[in-house]
Image: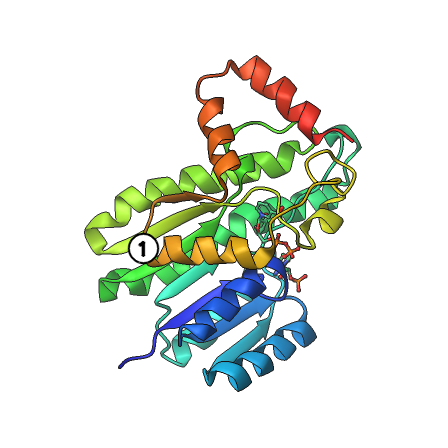
Amino acid sequence: MITKTALITGASSGIGLELAKLFAKNGFYLILVARSEERLEKLADELRYEHHVQVATFAKDLTDLNEIQSLFQIIEEENIFIDFLVNNAGFGDYGYFVESDWHKIHQMINLNMTSLTYMTHLFLQRMKKEGRGRIMNIASTAAFQPGPLMAVYFATKSYVLNFSEALFEELKEFNITVTTYCPGATATNFSNEANTNNSKLFKNRKLPTAAKVAEYGFMAMMQGKRLAIYGFMNRVMVFSTRFTPRSIVLKITKFILKE
Ligand SMILES: NC(=O)c1ccc[n+]([C@@H]2O[C@H](COP(=O)([O-])OP(=O)(O)OC[C@H]3O[C@@H](n4cnc5c(N)ncnc54)[C@H](OP(=O)(O)O)[C@@H]3O)[C@@H](O)[C@H]2O)c1
């Protein structure tokens, strides 16, 4: 049996880390990418030991396109075909846009949109040649409406949703699937990074674990689904935004995001 390889970005914590465990458990070879070298190496050791799979780690800052290019070059030189590409790395930022730190906002745009698009463009070329491949881009339930108090984050996730769904349709004829995965609020380090711990969306709520959320996304990717939204209530919420006036959706979203 030929072993398949999955590349996962943002594999050092949260949903990406749990996805890495699932791929390893299912016998995939892995390429894990994030900035924290130590955390990636620790995870890689665990996975090699528990599941006897090959795991390579790359400590890369994906906001830097040169680092993405160098990662791609190494993988090409080793002649590794990426059967499964998971663009998971991303972060958010909470607060009034006018008061936000420009550097952080710019990095978020770079990571959530530019790096995801560049990774997809690079690794798609060989998938098209081989006539197979699966991509999963992690968006969010934030993708379905504007998000006052997290304006840029919500907008980046709308981009991921629209970009990925368009690709799903384009790539059908090449036997490549693109799954857009939309988790809702999940118990990871995301809320610390984004300063959302006091927002009603995260505070005093029993959030699903990253393991549960990863499992649902993994299944959706394996099935080649176009869109997957985690959780019944999230699906209801997304569905209801289609029939609710935009002005009301804005007010409700702001209320939910407020501290
Ligand atoms: N948690 C939620 O509530 C939630 C809800 C919906 C969608 N999401 C989305 O799910 C995805 C995963 O987030 P998570 O919840 O698992 O958060 P997390 O635990 O904070 O994980 C984020 C991952 O991205 C990596 N990362 C951050 N900046 C990076 C950079 N510049 N270069 C390379 N890697 C970088 C982090 O690793 P390093 O720090 O080691 O680089 C980490 O592995 C994100 O796209 C997020 O937007 C999360």
Residue at the spot x=50%, y=63% of the render? Answer: 19
| In the foreground, 79 or 133 | 133
Q: Is 205 left, or right, of 117 in this rendering?
A: right
The image shows residue 139, relative to residue 58, as above or below, that is above
How many numbered markers are drawn?
Answer: 1
Secondary structure, mark 1, is loop
* Ligand 1 has an atom within 8 Å of the beta carbon of the residue at disc 1: no
Q: Position of residue 243 (x, y in %)?
A: 44, 17
Find disc 1 in the rendering and name its residue.
223
Q: Is residue 3 visible?
A: yes
Residue 170 sits above or below residue 84 on the image? above
In this orientation, which residue lies closer to the viewer: 165 or 75?
Answer: 165
The answer to whether residue 66 of the structure is visible from this angle is no
In the rendered image, which quarter is residue 46 located in?
Answer: bottom right
Q: For the point 59% across and 83% down, which residue is it?
A: 45
The colour mode here is rainbow
Residue, x 56% and y 48% (percent of image)?
A: 112
Say whether residue 152 is left or right of residue 169: right
- Residue occupying image coordinates x 39% and y 57%: 219
Amino acid type, residue under disc 1 in the picture = Gln
* Position in image of residue 170 (x %, y %): 27, 44
> Would you place residue 129 above or below residue 185 in this image?
below
Residue 132 at what x, y percent from top left? 25, 62
- Closer to the camera in the image, 187 or 78: 187
State which quarter of the image contains the C terminus.
Answer: top right
* Residue 35 picture quarter: bottom right
Mark 1, other Cα within 10 Å: few <14 / some 14–19 / many ≥20: few
**Quadrant where the N terminus lies?**
bottom left
Q: Give the quadrant of ligand 1.
A: bottom right
Q: Horizontal and vertical percent for residue 258?
A: 74, 28
